Amino acid sequence: MPTKPELEAQLKEAIRSGDSVRKRTLRMILAAAKLVEVERRGPLDEPALLAVLQKEARMRQESIADAERAGRADLVEDYRAELGLIESLLPRALPSDELEALAKKAIADVGASAPGDMGRVMKALMPQVQGRADGKAVSELVRSLLSQA
């Protein structure tokens, strides 16, 4: 995953090369990161920058859905290009078998045996999968594993 200075360097390169989609997307990412820095009153660490990238990706996915409903194929194409760039900056997603193995290990580590222990399992598991798996998917997986136990 790139750091903020690396994103700034990529922006400079996009400006030099005339890549308008990359330039526009990187500017939006850096503006969102700057907003978070101002709110936190300090520089972003890697998890915070990862959260910014994930939020920007979610925003593009929602924009794609809205543009499709409105019948705006031109906007859909633009948003998909931006989403592709953002996803290339995010870390590789965990395969489902790896995610399941991590979930089973977390369940064993905290000694969970019922769905009521889900909070403890999620607390142990989420730092390991942060940015590499969707929280909702992790939650559903843990819930199903605990209900089988």
Image (cartoon, rainbow, N blue to C red):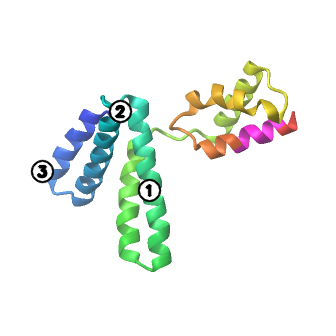
Would you say the residues marked 2 and 1 are in contact, meaning their CB atoms lie under 8 Å apart? Answer: no
SS type, badge 1: helix
Q: Quadrant of the C terminus?
A: top right
Task: Categorize mark 3 by other alpha carbons within 10 Å: few (<14), some (14-19), many (20+).
Answer: few
Residue beneath label 2, please? 40
**Where, by quadrant of the figure, is residue 112 drawn?**
top right
Query: How much space separates mark 3 and mark 2, taking CA atoms?
Result: 32 Å
> Disc 1 marks which amino acid?
Met
Q: Foreground: 17 or 90?
A: 90
Magenta highlight on residue 144: yes
- Mark seen at residue 59: 1
Q: Is residue 21 above or below residue 8?
A: below
Q: What x and y, as percent, mark residue 64?
A: 45, 66
> Disc 2 marks which amino acid?
Arg
Q: Foreground: 33 or 95?
A: 33
Magenta highlight on residue 148: no
User: Residues in magenta?
Assistant: 140-146
Q: What x and y, as percent, mark residue 16?
A: 12, 50
Q: What x and y, as percent, mark residue 34?
A: 28, 40
Residue beneath label 3, please? 16
Residue positioned 79% across, 20% down in the render: 111
Residue positioned 47% across, 59% down in the render: 61
Query: How much space separates mark 2 and mark 1, taking CA atoms?
Result: 21 Å
> Disc 3 marks which amino acid?
Arg
- Mark seen at residue 67: none
- Left or right for 126, reference 84: right
Mark positioned earlier in the residue sequence (2 or 1): 2
